[in-house]
Image: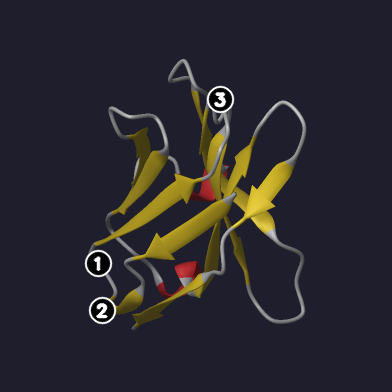
Amino acid sequence: VQLQASGGGLVQAGGSLRLSCAASGNIFRFEDMGWYRQVPGKQRELVASITFGGRTNYADSVKGRFTISRGNAKNTSYLQMNSLKPEDTAVYYCRTATIVAIYWGQGTLVTVSS
């Protein structure tokens, strides 16, 4: 299984970015898909997740600003990030879980300037 994340970059505070994650591999179904982020010296933290059925979960710090979704083929996830703040600066990782394993993408850097 491979996860390809894209969409990171530099944006000013108040701006928007959209992250994408495409999962591939000989897997019957990707269950949960999610986005995590990490800054140096801190643990990786959940940003948002979405189940195969579409149930979503968000970190309190991003509720109302970020939206996670899945593509029609269910093997892609998107993280729409609006009203970005400098504290959103981090490396963002996509993650997916099958019934037997968890997989991580390579990370994409999001930098929000003040």
Examine the rendered structure and indicate whether residue 48 appears above or below residue 30: below
Question: How many other residues sit within 10 Å of disc 1, few (<14), some (14-19) or many (≥20)?
Answer: some
Q: Amino acid at mark 2?
A: Gln
The residue beneath circle 3 is 28
User: Which badge, 1 or 3, is on the more N-terminal residue?
Assistant: 1
The one nearer the camera, 63 or 44, is 44
Q: Is residue 73 left or right of residue 60?
A: left
Whole-number angstrom distance, CA of label 1 to CA of label 3: 39 Å
Examine the rendered structure and indicate whether residue 70 appears above or below residue 107: above
Residue drawn at (36%, 34%) of the image? 70
Specify the label residue 84 is tagged with. none
Whole-number angstrom distance, CA of label 1 to CA of label 2: 6 Å
Question: How many other residues sit within 10 Å of disc 3, few (<14), some (14-19) or many (≥20)?
Answer: few
Dot 1 and dot 2 residues touching (CB under 8 Å): yes
Q: Is residue 28 left or right of residue 42?
A: left
Image x and y of residue 114, in percent: 34, 83
Whole-number angstrom distance, CA of label 3 to CA of label 2: 40 Å
Q: Quadrant of residue 98?
A: top right
Helix, strand or loop at disc 2? strand
The residue beneath circle 1 is 14
The one nearer the camera, 66 or 30, is 30
The residue beneath circle 2 is 12
Q: Quadrant of residue 13?
A: bottom left
Q: Is residue 93 left or right of residue 22?
A: right
Question: How many other residues sit within 10 Å of disc 2, few (<14), some (14-19) or many (≥20)?
Answer: some
Q: Nearer the viewer, mark 3 or mark 2?
A: 3
Q: Amino acid at mark 3?
A: Phe
